[in-house]
Image (tube, helix red, strand yellow):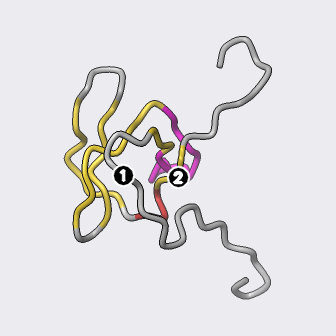
Amino acid sequence: MANGVMEARSMPDTQLSRGTRVDVRNRFVGAWSHGFEVAEQVADGYRIRRLSDDSVLPDVFPGEDIRPERRKQGLWWY
């Protein structure tokens, strides 16, 4: 908790292996987006693959900007 505000951390020192499906934090609005997997682990974080077109994104994502995939339960569109 910093200055009375609780900070959400997604990946506190947890290692994710290649192929693990993950959600990625949108850097513009802070919301989580799904449809990604870990392409590889690098020194500064992770390279992420978009599942829709199998593209590896050019940026390296730090651990706090990814989390294991969280699928909503009970909704017909998930």
Quarter where residue 41 is shown: bottom left
Q: Which residue appears at 63% of the width and 40% of the height?
A: 70
- Give yes or no for residue 29 being in the magenta stretch: yes
| Residue 63 in the image: above or below residue 37 | below
Q: Secondary structure at mark 1?
A: loop
- Give yes or no for residue 67 being in the magenta stretch: no
Q: Is residue 19 left or right of residue 47?
A: right
Q: Is residue 76 left or right of residue 67?
A: right
| Residue 17 in the image: above or below residue 1 | above
Q: x%, y% of residue 63? A: 43, 64
Quarter where residue 19 is shown: top left
Q: x%, y% of residue 30? A: 56, 52
Q: Which residue appears at 45% of the width and 53% of the height?
A: 27
Residue stretch in magenta: 24-34
For residue 67, the mark is: 2
For residue 6, the mark is: none
Q: x%, y% of residue 16? A: 41, 55
Location of mark 1 (residue): 17
Question: At label 2, which amino acid type do we have?
Answer: Arg
If the image is split into quadrants, where does the N terminus sit?
Answer: bottom right
Question: At label 1, which amino acid type do we have?
Answer: Ser
